[in-house]
Image (cartoon, rainbow, N blue to C red):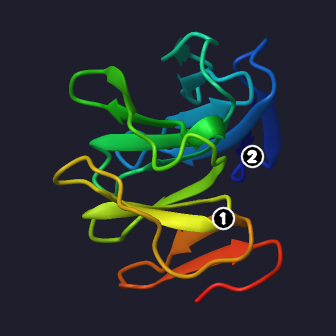
Amino acid sequence: VLFHNTTADQVVPLGRGLTRSRAVAIDPRDGSALCAGIAGTFFRVWSNGTVVNLTDALQPPLFDAAWSPDGAEALMVGASGTIYRYDRANDTVERRVGPDPLADLTGVSWASNGSGALITGFQAFWWYDRATGNVSAPVGNVTTDLTGVAWRPNRTEAIVIGTSGYVG
């Protein structure tokens, strides 16, 4: 894990020994990084080098992470339909029921209004409803592996990307 300071134009290694990280999301409240690891771990890293592990390496690999716009919770997604929710207020991690235990979930991005998040994966995308904590059935007609998603700031639109095929 590296920290890049643009003011000083320097890169500083943080969290030595934390290897095989796949995704990072910056906490909108305190600027710490939530990192998801390929070994199934996730942890928070602060710019002073403090590292807090949030899970043991017993879960499937994690591929993406995203904080809610208000910083109250974060979602991490990964292999075998894995979805984890981090509750900042209680400093707890809970495994959510994923949409499909056979689908690798490759991306997650919160709606700009914080009502939920789109999750991308193997030939589908799903909606995580923040109010209920439920994940919808697949949305749309997809014949490609979706690899990422990003919401347009202050909009009701998201961009979803994939390898090839059709999204409709």
Which residue, given by chain and number where applicable, does mark 1 sit on? 148
What residue sits 60% from the left and 20% below the top?
A: 59
Find residue 135 and name its label: none
Disc 2 secondary structure class: loop
Q: Position of residue 9 (x, y in %)?
A: 80, 49
Q: Identify the residue at image location x=25%, y=46%.
A: 133
Q: Give amino acid for label 2.
A: Ala
Above or below: residue 124 compared with residue 41: below
Query: What's the amino acid at mark 1?
Result: Gly
Label 1 Cα neighbours within 10 Å, binned few <14 / some 14-19 / many ≥20: many
Q: Which residue of the protein is positioned furthest toward the bottom in this rendering? A: 168
Q: Position of residue 25 (x, y in %)?
A: 55, 46
User: Which quarter of the picture shows residue 19?
Assistant: top right
When asked about the image quadrant of residue 75, the answer is: top left
In the image, which is nearer the foreground, mark 2 or mark 1?
1
- Front-most of residues 19 and 1: 19
Left/right of residue 99 with respect to residue 144 in the rendered view: left
Q: Nearer the viewer, residue 47 or 76?
A: 76
Q: Residue drawn at (32%, 41%), measured in percent from left and top?
A: 73
Please state which of residues 84 and 88 is positioned toward the viewer in this rendering: 84
Residue behind mark 2: 8
Residue 79 appears in the figure: yes
**Residue 127, image x and y in percent?**
39, 63
Q: Secondary structure at mark 1?
A: strand
Lower position in the chain sequence, tag 2 or tag 1: 2
